[in-house]
Amino acid sequence: MDIFNALTLMGGLSLFLFGMNIMGQALERRAGGQLRSLLGKFTTGRVAGILTGLCVTAVIQSSSATTVMVVGFVNSGLMTLRQAVNVIMGANVGTTVTAWILSLAGIDSGNLFIRLLKPSSFTPVLALTGIIFYMFCRDGKKKDTGTIFLGFATLMFGMETMSGAVSGLSDIPAFQNLFLLFRNPILGVLAGAILTAIIQSSSASVGILQALAVTGQVSYGAAVPIIMGQNIGTCLTAMISSVGANKNAKRAALVHLSFNVIGTAFWMLVFCLARAFFSLEFLSEPASLFGIAAAHSVFNLLCMVLMLPMSGFLEKLVTRLVPEEKQTESYMELDDRFFTAPSIALERCRKVTADMAYTAVASLKEGIASLKDFSPELASSIREKEEKTDYYEDILGTYLVKLSTMQISGPDSMEAAKLLKLIGDFERISDHAVNLLEAAEEIQNKNLRFTDTAVTELEILFSAISEILDLALAASVEDDLQAASMVEPLEQVIDRLKEKMRTSHILRLQQGGCSMEAGFVWSDMLTDLERTSDHCSNIAGCVLDIAHQSMNLHESLREIRNDSQEYRQKFQEYKEKYLSVLK
């Protein structure tokens, strides 16, 4: 093997790893919705957890990525440690899918239909289809499909390049002696563990082993220990991801390590005893690509069968190894570990944005309540909610900006932009709640009084604001387009209501029915309530924009006001409901 073969080998390995990486990312983006659906079944039992781990790993082609996600879920409290054990078991089996795909390269037959299954036969077609989808389709899903095809083609081309580069090694005595050395089970396990830890993918390390197998010098006796070691090496990624996480996340990562170490140790002992007491001639035979894929699958299935009854033991073991400790509570639903699966990260953002929305709306309604019946407890609750929404905006804004830099699908990108817009409006609503509270405190401290007419007008405005808040909340949290379409006509009525109330207030001032001090507070309250309705309009308009795949808020609202019969009908209904009752 000369320098040029070595360079070809490195180039093939680079293409192989790159193809596997971009294919996995594109698969995750393309299956984002289905992936979220699968992850929603974590709590449905042991079998469901195992199947979920298996399916998710088969989709994203990486048990390491699945385990990192699991660590993130456990860290945020969305998954229990027991549920994590089941998912991790399934992930170890799901990662064997890649080896079976790569084993297709070993097909050797004169039959036309069987030869068509060989990657070298259909990969060029996939590459051509992929580049057409990627370059000429504007739809994000079709582009992702093209990226999947291109990733697979790159992966298989890298695999064939590696195989071609190492084919000449079969005649080199040093290479033969190397794999004779790996027939020592301990050395084989170490080699597999180190290689996998370096490239952080057991699927990729199995692929490299399959590429080397074409030389005919990799026997089953050498391949099996290496495969066993690969399961230990793949734990490094999860262990790194648990650094800085809470105790349960550390335990989840340790479950992954314990599962693989115990399973490898047990079956390695069985393997050594079987070699010692039985004549296993097939271990001296050259390993085929299919044989390596089968050995990988059988080993992982045997580990799962062994450890499945011991899931409770694993949970107790890691609980002992990572004892309880006092920790300050923090909001950890937005975990950087979810960036390995951006669709999951976006789902968490939706959940946190919904929590923020409920908090902001509740604070504004409490602000209205403080104007009616002030109490120190209510004041404390409003300020606490305002601080919480500020915190939400900070962590969500930072997280969404990071997420937007990832390779995410077109719809997910628009959804991230929508959430960034929404959090700003909800934060401002909570600010207006504090402004209302300060008005209530001034009324309380200065013993200000409004006329009966003013109080009646306020009650009408309070009702209108409560209704528009509920509509905006339903629009943002539930993507309720019907509720969103009802916000703009109500916001226009609230604008007119505010102007009418301001005019009535000026008349009361002129007639001496209201003091100047009370008048200033009155004006501030009207401004805060009217601006709250403006933010509700922004929220509803943003939801409608995304539904119509547009980001032009003002244009959308203008079209609603000018061209919608439904808008005119709802405007008339709200006008009669709120404006007509004013004297």
Image: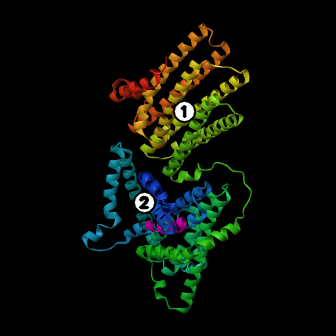
> Is the residue marked by circle 1 packed among few (<14), some (14-19), or many (20+) residues within 10 Å?
many
Q: Position of residue 163 (x, y in %)?
A: 43, 67
Q: Which mark, residue 155?
A: 2
Estimate the spatial distance between the alpha carbons at disc 2 and disc 1, rounded to whole Å: 46 Å
Q: Is residue 93 magenta?
A: yes
Query: Label 1 belongs to which residue?
Result: 425
Question: What SS does tag 2 mark?
Answer: helix
Q: Position of residue 223 (x, y in %)?
A: 51, 76
Name above or below for residue 539 compared with residue 155: above
Q: Position of residue 504 (x, y in %)?
A: 54, 14
Magenta segment main secondary structure: helix
Name above or below for residue 156 compared with residue 391: below
Residue at x 50% of width, y 91% of height: 279
**Marks 2 and 1: which is nearer the front?**
1
Labels 2 and 1 touching (C-beta < 8 A): no
Residue at x 57% of width, y 63% of height: 84
**Can you see residue 173?**
no
Residue lying farthest to the front in this orientation: 452
Start and end of the magenta stretch? 86-98
Name above or below for residue 501 compared with residue 104: above
